């Protein structure tokens, strides 16, 4: 599917994306995959960044990148991360085993340089007909019915680009955020980290993200494979213009690493200032923010780029659906409510993890170490730490405070939670056939029989399927193993969003289902024909059709229109 990227007579690109880092690339590729033409501009479009910033891609991001066919190339080019290990004064405190995750095709993280991640997504962007234009955003007029961006080109000329929507994915110093007048809010002191990539000789763990704490600070080590590592160390101060030398990293590796290593000549190094900031809003009219333009926080847990990827997919399916008429425009308001609380929660958890690594007082150190050891022995660290690190515990359940977003003590799915169902715009994600598939662009209706799949259930399934509007796929997931702990033994109908989060859980009866679809933002009209719903015969098989009537009665039409 190819779309021209230059404007022709009477033609306007509906969406302008500013910034071609990982977040902007995912956004543009997702929109193109859903048939929405995009202008993507970046002030360094000639090639990927030289410095590797984000280094870890967690399971949830791999699931979302699998929608555009980018996860498998990243896995092949990166290094598998099976666990996260915590040490204090070189003594083991506990671990989170990512390999024990059971509800994902990707029970691991991937350590990969950010420039490699960008190259992979650029390839997928090109496959959908996209390209990156060089341009620096120098102005943004939002006074009219549509925003007009002022873009300075490499040759010095200035273009004015009108778009229906403008998305700022242009980093922590976002020009879009500044020109849109959106404040970046936050509290707390900044923490300095020295970060560098390069070879380390020694017996370091090749498949674990290691955190080593000492009274002088914290050390993080992530293995790229082949004897190369990302090193991150907390430092009290740094006033020099050049990046920290290998000698500084060596000093703290000797002091904090549980295993000895010799730091070689670094590819690059820099000072990272860990701030805790979230934009006051991620939407201002027809302008949106995503990624570091919307939130910045500590590097602890390597959550930054991963959070931005979730921003990108959350916004892309909603915006594409509105542009194409599949969703009501009001659904765009949920982007800010969804992602703002998610960002605030990650700001909080990463700040806590950073502060734990900077304890200096004896009683603080003793309490931290004892707490982590106890959590490890009792399984609490694995129970809550693995979903948190993987970003599987991000939920869009109705919430007024961060407390409302905390995960439950049981595995039972609630509205807003992620369900282990997967989508792809082209070829299915490898390994995802173990779970039901959903539509990557529309709401999907999932039916769950509960305890008994009898004649009564078959009649219920048929009546609900017949009532489903055009374009809403219907899947009966009753035969799929592993869903009973999540959904219980009572028959249910679930409205599932294109990103796999549950929009509604209702009784499997036509009126309730139609009401849930409308409340979830789906746009459909009364009358017409019903697309024949697809129902899997069994896990791992091809989808087959369930024959239903292709017409609606006058009563159906009247109820739909109400």
Image (spheres, grey):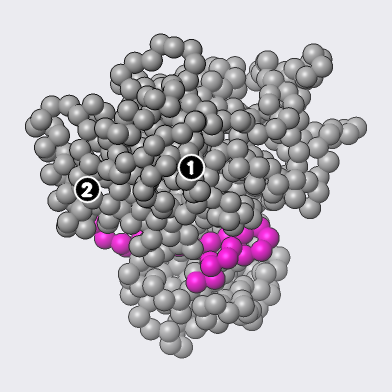
Relative to residue 465, is residue 82 depicted above or below?
above
Q: Which residue is drawn at 75% across and 42% down?
A: 130
Identify the residue under disc 1.
228
Left/right placement of residue 293 relative to residue 41 reads left
Name the main secondary structure of what is drawn in magenta.
loop
Mark before the other along the chain sequence, 1 or 2: 2
Image x and y of residue 271, in percent: 44, 22
Q: Which residue is drawn at 16% across and 41% down?
A: 369
Q: Which residue lies furthest to the left in this view?
A: 363
Helix, strand or loop at mark 2: strand
- In this rendering, does residue 300 appear at all? yes
Image x and y of residue 255, in percent: 26, 32
Relative to residue 240, is residue 342 depicted above or below?
below
Residue 380 among those drawn in magenta: no
Q: Residue at x 33, y 22 (%)?
A: 235
Q: Which quadrant of the view contains residue 29?
A: top right
Image x and y of residue 44, in percent: 68, 26
Identify the residue under disc 2.
92
């Amino acid at each position: 599917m190819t779309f021209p990227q230059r404007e022709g007579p009477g033609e306007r690109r509906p969406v302008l994306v500013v910034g071609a880092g990982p977040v902007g690339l995912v956004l543009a590729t997702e929109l193109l995959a859903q048939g929405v033409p995009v202008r993507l501009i970046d002030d360094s479009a000639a090639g990927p960044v030289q410095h590797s910033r984000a280094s870890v891609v967690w399971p949830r991001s791999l699931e979302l990148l699998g929608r555009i066919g980018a996860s498998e190339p990243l896995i092949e080019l990166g290094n598998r991360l099976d666990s996260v290990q915590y040490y204090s004064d070189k003594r083991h405190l506990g671990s989170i085993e990512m390999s024990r995750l059971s509800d994902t095709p990707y029970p691991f993280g991937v350590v990969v340089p950010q420039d490699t991640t960008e190259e992979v997504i650029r390839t997928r962007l090109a496959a959908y007909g996209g390209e990156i234009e060089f341009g620096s955003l120098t102005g943004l007029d939002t006074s009219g019915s549509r925003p007009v961006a002022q873009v300075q080109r490499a040759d010095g000329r200035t273009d004015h680009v009108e778009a229906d929507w403008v998305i700022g994915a242009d980093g922590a110093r976002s020009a879009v955020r500044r020109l849109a007048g959106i404040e970046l809010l936050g509290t707390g002191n900044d923490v300095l980290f020295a970060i560098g990539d390069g070879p380390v000789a020694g017996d370091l763990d090749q498949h674990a993200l290691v955190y080593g704490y000492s009274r002088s600070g914290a050390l993080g080590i992530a293995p790229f494979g082949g004897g190369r590592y990302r090193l991150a160390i907390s430092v009290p101060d740094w006033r020099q213009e050049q990046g920290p030398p290998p000698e500084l990293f060596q000093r703290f590796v000797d002091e904090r690493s549980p295993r000895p290593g010799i730091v070689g000549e670094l590819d690059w190094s820099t000072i990272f200032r860990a701030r805790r900031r979230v934009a006051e809003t991620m939407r201002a009219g027809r302008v949106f923010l995503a990624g570091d333009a919307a939130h910045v926080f500590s590097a602890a847990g390597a959550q930054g780029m991963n959070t931005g990827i979730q921003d990108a997919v959350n916004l892309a399916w909603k915006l594409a659906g509105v542009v194409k008429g599949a969703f009501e425009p009001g659904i765009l308001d949920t982007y800010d409510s969804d992602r703002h609380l998610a960002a605030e929660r990650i700001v909080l958890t990463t700040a806590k993890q950073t502060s734990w690594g900077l304890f200096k007082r004896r009683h603080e150190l003793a309490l931290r170490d004892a707490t982590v050891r106890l959590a490890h022995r009792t399984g609490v660290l694995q129970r809550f730490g693995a979903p948190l690190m993987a970003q599987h515990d991000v939920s869009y359940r109705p919430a007024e405070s961060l407390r409302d977003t905390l995960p439950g003590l049981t595995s039972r799915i609630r509205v807003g939670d992620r369900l282990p169902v997967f989508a792809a715009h082209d070829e299915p994600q490898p390994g995802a056939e173990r779970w039901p598939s959903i539509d990557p662009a529309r709401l999907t209706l999932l039916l769950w029989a509960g305890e008994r799949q009898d004649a009564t259930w078959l009649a219920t399934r048929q009546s609900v399927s017949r009532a489903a509007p055009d374009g809403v796929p219907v899947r009966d997931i009753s035969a799929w193993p592993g869903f009973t702990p999540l959904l219980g033994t009572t028959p249910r109908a679930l409205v599932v969003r294109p990103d796999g989060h549950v929009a509604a859980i209702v009784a499997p009866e036509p009126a309730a289902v139609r009401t849930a679809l409308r409340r979830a933002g789906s746009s459909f009209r009364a009358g017409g024909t019903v697309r024949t719903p697809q129902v899997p015969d069994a896990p791992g098989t091809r989808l087959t059709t369930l024959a239903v009537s292709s017409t609606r009665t006058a009563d159906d039409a009247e109820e739909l229109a109400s």
